[in-house]
Amino acid sequence: GGDVFNYYSDGQWNKSSSGKFVPIINPTSRKIHFKVQACTQEEVNKAIESAKVAQKLWAKTPLWKRAELLHKAAAILKEHKAPIAECLVKEIAKPAKDAVTEVVRSGDLVSYCAEEGVRFLGEGKFLVSDSFPGNERTKYCLTSKIPLGVVLAIPPFNYPVNLAVSKIAPALISGNSIVLKPPTQGAVAALHMVHCFHLAGFPKGLISCVTGKGSEIGDFLTMHPDVSCISFTGGDTGIAISKKSAMIPLQMELGGKDACIVLEDADLDLVAANIVKGGFSYSGQRCTAVKVALVMKSVADTLVKKINDKVIKLTVGPPEDDCDITPVVTESSANFIEELVMDAKKKGATFCQEYKREGNLIWPLLMDNVRPDMRIAREEPFGPVLPVIRINSVEEGILHCNASNFGLQGCVFTKDINKAILVSDAMETGTVQINSAPARGPDHFPFQGLKESGIGSQGITNSINMMTKVKTTIINLP
Ligand code: G3P
């Protein structure tokens, strides 16, 4: 079963000559829900070729016109929020309301990007030579920002639409073309989103969306000589891509093990609300989810109780019913989460609930008295399970956080701003949130990971900057 969707290239919807499909399994029913084309390397090649041709003209299209088309695409995207959200519900089991939010947020991101682009790219610099020793004022230097060429965008399953447009919109406003390789689960939502760009009337070839197996077209895409920039969000694959890619700008957002450090003076109701939201929204399948709580011993009993009171109120079930906790994306993901849970159990963690699983659905689980030697203390489950480690000092919390290979975000809860800043400075992460759970948005804020959490910085302005090069023209006077 499952409706079959075509891929998008050269302004058209195409079937692959491979005659093969990639099935998309609904995480809730665990049955095939949709099928997408298994593109061949030759088809990928063609998409990149037309992107290369289209980009040359697009780069010469006035900036205000590029912005106008993006605004149009944003409006169409918002009009189509219901069918796109429906795909997110079926493909990745995102709760119904969150699925709509993802599409609306994406429309807003595209519009913001268009506005930011006209200002940011609409300005250049003018330099004179006589500020540098030994020079007269005989050289005038004009700088502007020029596009890179073909940008390859690879978003992950957890935000197939939002993390696609966060790459597409900055690329397009800057005068680049786009080849999108969506995640398998989320591919149909991404194709619908691309359809909105198609309806907005972008030139043919400028945007394409190729679907298929990573094992068949992944390396081919990422190592293609005509790709000038890769923007990737996902897991370990990003590290492999970085090692194999040519000398092109890379933007990578990979995993995280975001720690929440709770000091003795923290507002514990605020902490509990943030830990539950941060740890359990979309069943913990966010790179910015709270993945370990490091709580000062003196307040741990009270806080664990407060968190638990909220955890037991989380609704568990299908995404169609807008439940808080929905099935995780694949069976292998559920198996991995279970492995980490069982390891913690064996090593003596205190389970605040019985561990329960049906198919891909895992009930929310809070684990207290977790120790650093348990896998759950260090590894990223990407599921609705949250470890609490009791700490004797702030330093112990910081040490645990910094021992991680990841360094995406972290957070600290305290009423003492001086302590908060000290902790923030000490945490080796791209961002530290004071008195709130980690999160990427608002989408114009810089977003970056240290260590294995990534390279480069995202956020609307940073992405536009990263997807352009500085070009200078120097006028030499007699
Ligand atoms: O997991 C992807 C990451 O970008 C999270 O985004 O908005 O859930 O903080 P957000």
Image: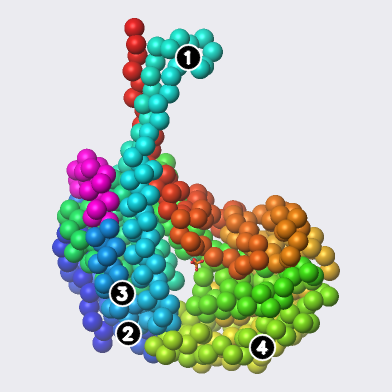
Residue 128 forms part of the magenta stretch: no
Q: Quadrant of residue 404?
A: bottom right
Q: Which of marks 1 and 4 is nearer the N terminus?
A: 1
Relative to 50, does residue 413 appear above or below in the rendering?
below
Nearer mark to the viewer, of 4 and 2: 4
Q: Main secondary structure of the magenta part?
A: helix
Q: Earlier in the sequence, mark 1 or mark 2?
A: 2
Q: How far apart are marks 1 and 4 (CA)?
A: 68 Å
Residue closest to the eye, 102 or 334: 102
Highlighted magenta segment, given as a residue range: 52-70
Q: Where is residue 108 in the image (x, y as percent from the top left)?
A: 37, 63
Which residue matches tag 1? 130
Q: How far apart are marks 4 and 3 (CA)?
A: 34 Å
Which residue is located at x 63 percent, y 78 percent? 273
Which residue is located at x 27 percent, y 65 percent? 75
Q: Quadrant of residue 476?
A: top left
Q: Which of marks 2 and 3 is nearer the N terminus?
A: 2
Q: Where is residue 292 in the image (x, y as percent from the top left)?
A: 66, 71
Which residue matches tag 2? 32
Graded by Cα atoms within 10 Å as few (under 14), some (14 to 19) or many (20 or more), the crowding at tag 4 reads few
Image quadrant in which the C terminus is located: top left
Residue closest to the eye, 158 or 25: 158
> Regarding mark 4 in the picture, which secondary structure is present there?
helix
- Report the side of 21 relative to 228 (left or right): left
